[in-house]
Amino acid sequence: MTDLFTYKDEKELDPNHLSPYQARRELKRLAEEIERHNEFYHRNDAPIISDAEYDALRIRYQKIVELFPERAPEEDPLEKIGAPALEGFGKVTHKVPMISLNNVFSQEEMENFIQKIKRFLGYSETEEIEFFAEHKIDGLSFSARYENGVLISGATRGDGYVGEDITQNLKAVEKFPVNLNGKNIPSVLEVRGEIYMSQEVFFNLNKENSAKGEKVFANLRNAAAGALRQLDPSITKRRHLQYFVYGIGEIKGNNLGYKQSERMELLKELNFCIHPDSKIVKGMYEIVEYYEDVYKKRSELGYDIDGIVYKVDRFDLQERLGYVSRRPRWAIAYKFPAEQGKTVLEKITIQLGRTGTLTPVANLTPITVGGVVVSRATLHNEDEITRKDIREGDTVILQRAGDVIPQIVAVDLSMRPADSKPFEAPALCPVCGSLAVREEGEAARRCTGGLICDAQGVERLKHFVSRNAFDIEGLGEKQIESFWNDKIITTPADIFTLEMRDMENIFGSIANREGWGKKSAENLFKAINLRRKIRLDRFIYALGIRHIGHTTARLLALNYGSFKRWTNAMLEAVKEFPLPKGEGSACARPSQREGEYLLSINGIGEVVAKSILDFFREPHNLRILDELAALIEIEDMENISGNSEIAGKTIVFTGTLSKISRQEAKAKAESLGAKVAGSVSAKTDFVVAGEDAGSKLKKANELGVKVLSEDEWLGLSINSIT
């Protein structure tokens, strides 16, 4: 079997050769990189790195976590999916969230995935599980809702909860059914699938656009996304998009089978396009055989795929397995190998991020890899450069799997110039001239300039208005940089006073600025006003607190519910946990009521708690919060499973459970909207105690927290479902 990546020196990248200290530093570095590139990928379908580089980051992260689980960052960087809906379209709320899949890249990882499922379900080593296998189409995910057989709405994935309304565009997709025909049509049916463009259409489109001097698309996925997101459906129709349905979201009136394979056949009978090469596989031999067979004939398909999706076939097992955050335990994408090429690294430059991180970037002699021209690649940090011994002037080996910028995996030492010199990390910030320091345990250097560093200030504002934060249309990176340079917008609050200051002619009319006009200025003010109401989780994410990604922001929002409760609790925690004399930041764990509760939240550890409390210690951050609270409305966070009896309750599991695994019990509680904590506090609602329960049970009794047996918990969770 072909393995996923080929390195010049496998031992060089082998996580087994890392020390625990190195592993902790490397995991921190990888977590930051994955989160950063998640943002770029979901911002206007314009990633700055390739699928290959992104996959390699995930591979390395997962391998190191398996070897050093105690060194893993507090927040899993692999959980985020999707992006908020674009403002140019209406919005559609998904009744059932649209999930994304985890990936594996080798036979060993696929075997580990299956073993985890067996352990979760309590299966023996010899018991086999049937999987439904299908092609992983490299396109754009969609949902389509039918009521009584009539298409009512269509939507993109969006951020998994809210997508863009593309109903009319879906009708322009070839062979897409507007009315369903057949027996036993459900009264409500929401299908999920993938829109794609054939290679023939793609090449013809680029040829025509090139001749007209119009945009040439980098790959099929971007072309399909651009075609589906047309405000004029007639343009979508001319792009000859196609689709495959791969599953169902909401359904009422007819369950359409008890297995994935049965459901797909029934959907086919309703005239949906189902992939003809899908099949049932059982055991690693059949799984690998299907993978190899599809990989060999991949070039003959006429459309892009980047792997195989394997789903547990039985729905009852899928329900038991549930989800980890927003990704299913019962499905995986087994991805294909990356493509490689060689080019020259001309120069290493430094890119500065919003948190002050200095990231070295390789500027390359342009090269075509997999049909895409690439000229830049991130080098992560100085350790990565030293480990691979990358120097300016080197001929480097690249790999990519589908997008723009590849990963540098190795250096061809035989072609190294005689006068080459090792890379030297900068001692000063290239933007503000402040010291660039590398703290103990950190992989990256950071600028110490803070708010006086223009790069950090402008990058924080870019993050604030990004699609997954406030998502202000017309206020992108170029506009933020322009307003920042002219001192028109220097704080988040300045965005929401922009129109008032413009009317008062404080800085001159925006309509008179170069590249602007009366209409564009009016559109900007309108877009800003549309964002004066924002959900709590997106607001927390927009603040740019270090280590607070989408998943952690949502976790905080669900646990505290409202902006007022969250800020009051954090301010109390700061009081309970005063800054040690002579120290510049928190250096010990909170130990009182609010601090304890923060740390008890499943998924919040000391590193994340420290970042949050450090943020609330800074007077200028509190001033920003006060200014924003006076200018905008921050909506309370409602739990998705709000109808459950245990929704919003905080539950702690302790001891050994005999009827289901602890992992399955926690997963079920979270799926019903409960908050699973790792420790008992006064805010705990229930403690579920199995056999040999220890200190947590003792503390629950001391605090008067209600204790449930395993049978009582199972009864409560069943009643919550019904």
Image (cartoon, grey):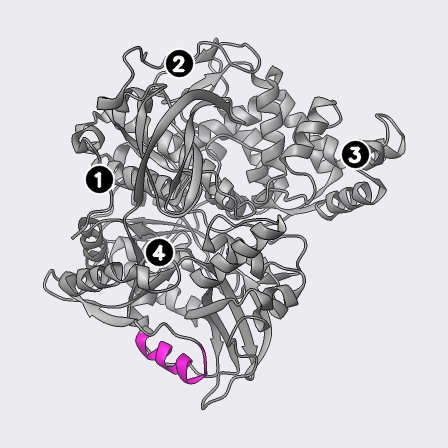
Q: Dividing the picture into quarters, in which one does residue 147 lie?
A: bottom right
- Residue type (three-letter) at the residue carrying disc 3: Leu
**Residue annotated with mark 4:** 667
> Are dots 4 and 1 in contact, CB under 8 Å?
no
Residue annotated with mark 1: 6
**Mark 4 to mark 3 CA distance (whole Å):** 45 Å
Residue drawn where x is 53% and y is 83% of the image: 187
Name the N-terminal-most of marks 4 and 1.
Answer: 1
Distance of mark 2 from mark 1, alpha carbons? 28 Å
Q: Quadrant of residue 411?
A: top left
The residue that label 2 is drawn on is 425
Give the farthest residue toward the bottom.
183
Along the line of sight, the residue nearer the viewer: 682 or 460: 460
Image quadrant holding the C terminus, namely bottom left
Q: Secondary structure at mark 4?
A: helix
Mark 3 highlights which residue?
Answer: 498
User: Which residue range is magenta in the image?
Assistant: 261-272
Q: Main secondary structure of the magenta part?
A: helix
Q: Earlier in the sequence, mark 4 or mark 2?
A: 2
Spatial distance from mark 4 to mark 2, Cα to Cα? 45 Å
Amino acid found under the numbered disc labelled 1 = Thr
Judge whether 34 appears above or below 275 on screen. above
Observer able to see residue 571: yes
Q: Would residue 262 be counted in the magenta stretch?
A: yes
Given this view, does label 4 or label 2 mark the residue nearer the observer? 2
Residue 112 in the image, given as x and y percentages of width and height? 20, 51
Tell me which label, 2 or 1, sits earlier in the chain.
1
Q: Secondary structure at mark 3?
A: helix
Q: Tag 4: residue type?
A: Ala
Question: Where does residue 558 sit, x and y in percent of width and height?
Answer: 52, 48
